[in-house]
Image: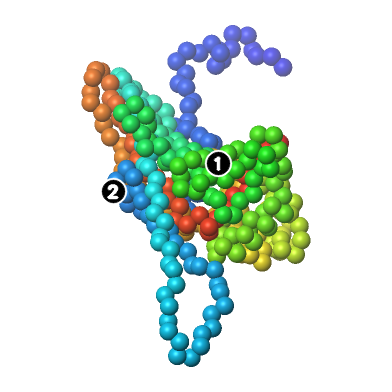
Amino acid sequence: MAQPTNTFDSYDAKGIREDLQDVIYNVDPEETPFYTAAAKLRATNTLHEWQTDGLRASADNAHIEGDDTVAEARSATTRLGNYTQIFKNAVVVPGTDEGLNKAGRAREMAYQVLKIAKEQKLDIEKALFANQARVVGSSSAARRLAGAPAWLTTNTVFGANEGADPTGDGTNARTDETTALTAFSQTKFDNVMQSIWTSGGKPDSVYLSAFQMNIALGFTGNNNQRSPVQAGDERDVKSMAVYVTPWGTVEWKPTRENRSRDVFIMQDDMWAVATLRPTKNEALSKTGDNEKRQVVTELTLVCRNEAASGIIADNTTS
């Protein structure tokens, strides 16, 4: 078939209006499970401090009738602290933007500020999982919060050569293994779960990368209890939201912002985020034909008691 001669079609026409949807599609992830699950506190200083304590080990406790009572030695609480970290991002939009008719958003500044707030939340999640020590900061160096790996010392599995626990007060990071990485396994997981239970913890969440989650999907045994799929459900399900062990029941929470080599087993209520300055959208001083705004958050991570959580570090990632 062919067009009739002199057909005036759309290829010849001028002035056809564009067909651009008035929406912007974004598939980038914005979930922050650890930041979301952590309790929220208010900080009033750049060094936020707290105390931890524990019970002595159980002992044989029997006494003679009428004997004198002698006080036993008691230990003091442990005082810990973490520095607040400033998260800041800014955007500059020229004044011309006010006169433009754009698809998908009314004003470029509002759209960009919303994006920045989501991106900054991901930065916060990344910092909470980061293997970094706290840094007091100075006029030439930024303050930094100590991430979760810097606190965990009691219930840990790590590499056999260079791998080592930190001191556990946030002043130094974990020592990463470089030569003897081994695969994440059910044995490692169960050992840390048992250790947490022995320490008195009640873990409820496991934070791990997609790679390590795929390994966890292969866990087997009577201590791997999953919710059954209904007989009438025709879907092919390969999922494990809840994992039941003799040492507690945990929910698997795949994350994108933690290091893939680390698997965290956490009691969520033993972690908190102390905020000195809540997220705020602020206008910056005008210096020309433009508009400037910044999004600022200042907060730190609180490890209420590290013995309630654990880490399986130095896992292979491929």
Residue 58: x percent and y percent?
A: 55, 72
Determine if residue 110 is in view.
no
Residue 192: x percent and y percent?
A: 64, 56
Query: Which numbered circle lies on residue 44?
Result: 2
Give the answer, above or below, for where 77 lies relative to 297: below
Give the answer, above or below, for where 32 lies relative to 201: above
SS state under label 1: loop
Residue 167: x percent and y percent?
A: 51, 46
Query: Which numbered circle lies on residue 174?
Result: 1
* Residue under the point 54% across and 11% down: 12
* Residue under the point 56% across and 54% down: 154
User: How are the colours assigned in the image?
Assistant: rainbow
SS state under label 2: loop
Nearer the observer, 283 or 69? 69
Q: Amino acid at mark 1?
A: Arg
**Given contact means CB atoms under 8 Å apart, are the residues at marks 2 and 1 in contact?**
no
Give the answer, above or below, for where 284 lies relative to 280: above
Nearer the observer, 44 or 96? 44
Local crowd size for mark 1, using a 10 Å CA cut-off: few (<14), some (14–19), many (≥20): many
Q: Quadrant of residue 199?
A: bottom right
Nearer the observer, 129 or 63? 63
3D distance between C-alphas at marks 2 and 1? 28 Å
* Residue under the point 55% across and 16% down: 10
Please indicate whether residue 252 sits to the left or right of residue 303 in the image. right
Q: Quadrant of the C terminus?
A: top right
Q: Amino acid at mark 2?
A: Thr
Q: Quadrant of residue 227?
A: bottom right
Q: Quadrant of the N terminus?
A: top right
